Image (cartoon, rainbow, N blue to C red):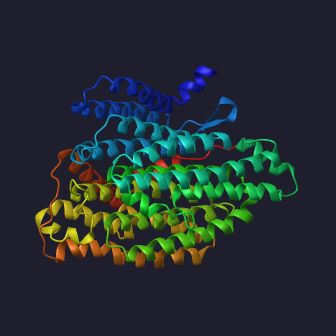
Amino acid sequence: MLLEDLLSILPLVIVAGWATILVIIDLFIPKERKGITAALAALGLVAAAVAAILQFGQSKTLFGGMLLLDGFASFLQILFLGAGLLAIAQAFDYLRRREIERGEYYTLLMFSISGMMLMSMAGDLIVIFIALELLSIPLYILSGFARPQPVSEEAALKYFILGAFASGFMVYGIALIFGTTATTSLAGILNAFAASPGVPALAMVGGALVLVGLGFKVAAVPFHMWTPDVYVGAPTSVTAFMSVGAKAGGFAALLRMLIAAFPDAAAAWGPVTMWIAALTMTWGNVAAIAQSNIKRMLAYSSIAHAGYIFMALPSAAVAGVAPEAVRGALFYLMAYAITNLGAWGVVLAMEKAEGAGLEIDDYAGLGKRRPIMALAMALFMLSFTGVPPTVGFIGKFYLFRAAIDANLIWLALVGVITSLISAYYYLRVVVVMYMRPGEPETQNEPLLNSTVWLAAIGTFVFGVLPSPLLALAHMAELIRL
């Protein structure tokens, strides 16, 4: 039985085990040849991705219910591993250019991915907490990877302090839930609530505190304060990965916990998540308008997109809409990952060695000097806005439809209005690239350029032919506890 369970979590074992081995191997790789470490890390992620694809469609409980293998977990694991591969490709030349290339970058990245994968499979609140810390601690270190630059050290310190504060909320919330239900298992919590006439108030408080901890991780209002400063201060390659992986990991836990373990409390958490979604969409898009720095603008954009994904939670609180809401959230997470990593790839190409070139005005003339790069960036901005034919439009369509089916028409209207607001600052980048004169300096790095082109192709193709991604999302069912 133990061997069968271990084989069922083979993708996670490959990533975590290979990262551990790579720490030792890296000691014998010369400083000037750390590209070998990057290649070995990518090889491990590819092997894990193959294992995850082969497991897709399985549904079983593992290790006494501590871990759950289902389509939901497999879908997210493929997302995390794909994002990790693109992150390694984007970081390869960037770290050399910034003169901060060290082998531990890639091992830390892999450990963080293993935390995200564990989060997607978590069937117990303790596992969720362990996964959250395994996800977060490497990101705290990576945020300060550009030391001794003060802005990078400040980003790491802010992220660490606020992250530890949020973890404290989460641990206290888990303790309250355990004190009420005498279990931390999601299945046990579900059974305990079903056996009682109502959800105990103490358990509701505990659930709210857990929501605070996970809300910090996905950068939802009002737990978003760390996001702009950390995104700006961290090395751009770290920010690109963090904006996708940490967000998807947090939503993996939120979706599984609220829908699988707390359906009896939907009357309480439904309205709370509804208002969080509305506030996050509104504040993220309004605050982004005033930004002149592309990293800070994309940071507030990330907050806004967390709001769109949050719409799936109140929609799922309505009986019968939960499967559709989960599929919409998963599709949007994949669409956001493709588009966002592509956009950050362009930012990486524009950033100079000393960290300059990050103002939106620095993109003036890019349409003339690098037409393919500018076209890709324009496509990413349209996808963020939700303009067809891009994958971002399809993602928003399914989330808004789930909200309408749940009779949350006003929330869908907030999503539409804030999307229109976002067009101002997204299209401003397009206007600057094509309608203002300039001679921007860009990095001509084949590996980085290939990630941008790959993301641009995915953004367009999945916008025109979304069926493959939709089919995967339909197969990504949550296991019944």
Q: Residue at x 49, y 61 (%)?
A: 226
| Residue 289, quarter of picture | bottom left
231 vs 356, left or right, is right
Q: Looking at the image, how many numbered discs can be counted on the residues?
A: 0
Q: In which quadrant is the N terminus drawn?
A: top right
Between residues 368 and 215, which one lies in front from this camera angle? 215
Between residues 266 and 297, which one lies in front from this camera angle? 297
Q: Position of residue 321 (x, y in %)?
A: 63, 61
| Residue 423, quarter of picture | bottom left
| Residue 108, quarter of picture | top left
Q: Residue at x 15, y 70 (%)?
A: 365
Q: Position of residue 170 (x, y in %)?
A: 66, 51
Find the residue positioned furthest to the right.
197
Q: In which quadrant is the C terminus drawn?
A: top right
Residue 384 in sight in this render: yes
Q: Position of residue 295 (x, y in %)?
A: 34, 63
80 vs 198, left or right, is left
Between residues 174 and 381, which one lies in front from this camera angle? 174
Q: Position of residue 82 (x, y in %)?
A: 38, 43
Q: Residue at x 39, y 56 (%)?
A: 466
Q: Is residue 122 above or below residue 441?
A: above
339 vs 370, left or right, is right
Residue 261 in sight in this render: no
156 vs 33, left or right, is right
Between residues 107 and 207, which one lies in front from this camera angle? 107
Q: Residue at x 61, y 46 (%)?
A: 478
